[in-house]
Amino acid sequence: MSMLASLVLLVGALLGAGTGTARAADVPAEFGTDWHDPVTAAPPVARPHGRSCQVTLADAQFRDFTPFRGTYTPPTGCGDHWSKVVLRLDGTVKGRQYDRLGYLHVGGVEILRTSTPEPSPDGIAWHVEKDVTRYSDTFRGRRDVELLIGNVVDDTYTGVIDVHVTLTFYAGRPAEQAPDRVLTLADTPDGTTLTTPRNSERIVAEVYATGSGGGCEEFWYLTVADPASYSCKADHGPYREVQIKVDGRPAGIAAPYPNVWTGGWSDPFLWYVIPAPGALDVRPIQYDLTPFAGLLDDGRPHRVEVSVVGVPSGQAGWSAPVNVLVWQDAHRDHLTGGLTEDTATDLANSSVYTPGSQNRVDTRAGHRLTVSGYLDTSHGRVTTTVTRTLANTSVHRWTDGENTDGLDATWTDDETVGITGSGPARSTHTLRTYTMNGATTIGSDSRLRTELTIGDRASVSERRDGRRTAWSRLDDTYRGDASYLLDAPRDQRHAVGTSSERYRSYGSAGCYDHSLATAQGVLTQDHSGC
């Protein structure tokens, strides 16, 4: 047993106080046919007090790639403006099954992107909660519902995925103004277009960008360019960047989060209880398109394109659906304005291959974009400037035959949104940092071992006239160490594994701190407290 496993058992024995946690004597020597249901350390959605109404969106079973289709009808008894709207997906599956990707659309708007945990033979249950208040405009009318978790069921993969999805509406006004409109892109012969209301005062696009399962783009951060001798190839190496353009002009850039699904890194035993951060609730990338509002407010359709830089030419593998959130000027029917700056640096992308007994690829990449525009609103001229700077460094090492394969990578996405005019100058600075450090090794005894640490961090600072008015810090860190015997029947793999997650957030609005730990599928620690 690893040192980490011993430490987890000791902590579990000393604490033993978390709900559903085990003492050392209760932890088996290896994985069995059942384990703890999936859990995450992320905070639950805070729910307000008062009157609420619930609507069922879907009851569905997935055996193949046939989507569930239904109809959503708004709730009665809670009005048509809500203080909060909470989505909940409950799932069950048992037997043998891969991790599967899924989406939920209401009126064409994607409100959830998810993946599924892999089941035990005896079966698991899990749930996902998400604050979807920002889609309130969509929920005010009768809408089509489409839910798909593509699956394959046959003599080998027996797990049928059962899901139940609800929306709970809480009466009252939200703490922050929800968007007035939630739009999707229209498909035209020339591509996808967007037509916004002519009084759009703030415009934000969100993109649920994910590398697909079943191919190298699922593990895009490990790809290499020729002449490196590695199984997953890409024309320019592992750098990926999600770009959005308006009428062919750069409007936003972002670093995609390196999602790891629950079969990732060749070792599902890492994820049976604690999935990687964001695996069950994929966070969309957001782009503030307000600098383009002066152009978009002309009442005409405008071409909007999303692309992923670095994907090998002619190769699919990414999904990037777009929602557009719009806040309108309540006192004017038509706003005018203009784009005053749209400048980008050259995209830097260096990926250097060094062959040897341990092959190595060093990648250094980055990009910077600044866009600025003004609007003449009912409360004066307002100028919005968005500056975003991306950087990626990684070292990928592997041996011939890839019996040892390791990565140490960091991505940063540094964004500042500044607003001037109509009152004090305001700015929001957000620094996102993603890290991945791990290795997979196959020993001479055909035992595969994976050690992996994943970090999801963010800091946010809001200023008004140069003075900080609000701030927050987030650190969500996962650690895992698991091994099993390759090329053996499932009940003879002699798998062991430990995992842990600590989710910490703190700032001017308060704090949250939650730690989980597991060993051989048993929850050994569940501790909360700031």
Image (cartoon, rainbow, N blue to C red):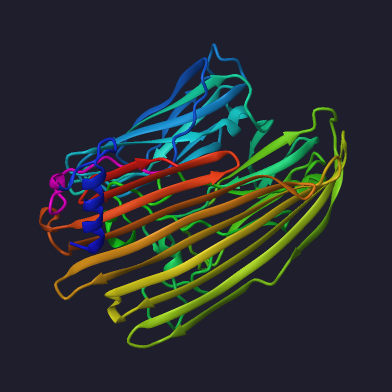
Q: Residue furthest top?
A: 77
**Residue 72, position as x, y percentages in the image:** 50, 23
Disc tally is 0
Residue 275 is a magenta residue: no
Quadrant housing residue 221: bottom left
- Magenta range: 25-41
Is residue 190 something one can see in this rendering?
no
Q: Residue furthest bottom?
A: 356
Q: Residue furthest front?
A: 14
Answer above or below: position of 448 versus 352: above
Answer above or below: position of 127 versus 10: above
Q: Residue at x 38, y 82 (%)?
A: 359
Q: Magenta segment, principal secondary structure?
A: loop
Q: In which quadrant of the rendered image does the N terminus lie?
A: bottom left
Quadrant housing residue 307: bottom right
Answer above or below: position of 345 versus 109: below
Is residue 496 something one can see in this rendering?
yes
Work out whether residue 228 or residue 329 is closer to the camera in this orientation and state it.
329
**Residue 165, position as x, y percentages in the image:** 41, 29
Q: In which quadrant of the rendered image does the C terminus lie?
A: top left
Quadrant housing residue 343: bottom right
Residue 33 is a magenta residue: yes
Work out whether residue 33 or residue 301 is closer to the camera in this orientation and state it.
33
**Residue 281, position as x, y percentages in the image:** 45, 43
Q: Residue at x 15, y 64 (%)?
A: 487
User: Position of 91 compared to 314: left or right?
Assistant: left
**Residue 470, position as x, y percentages in the image:** 66, 43
Answer above or below: position of 433 versus 310: above
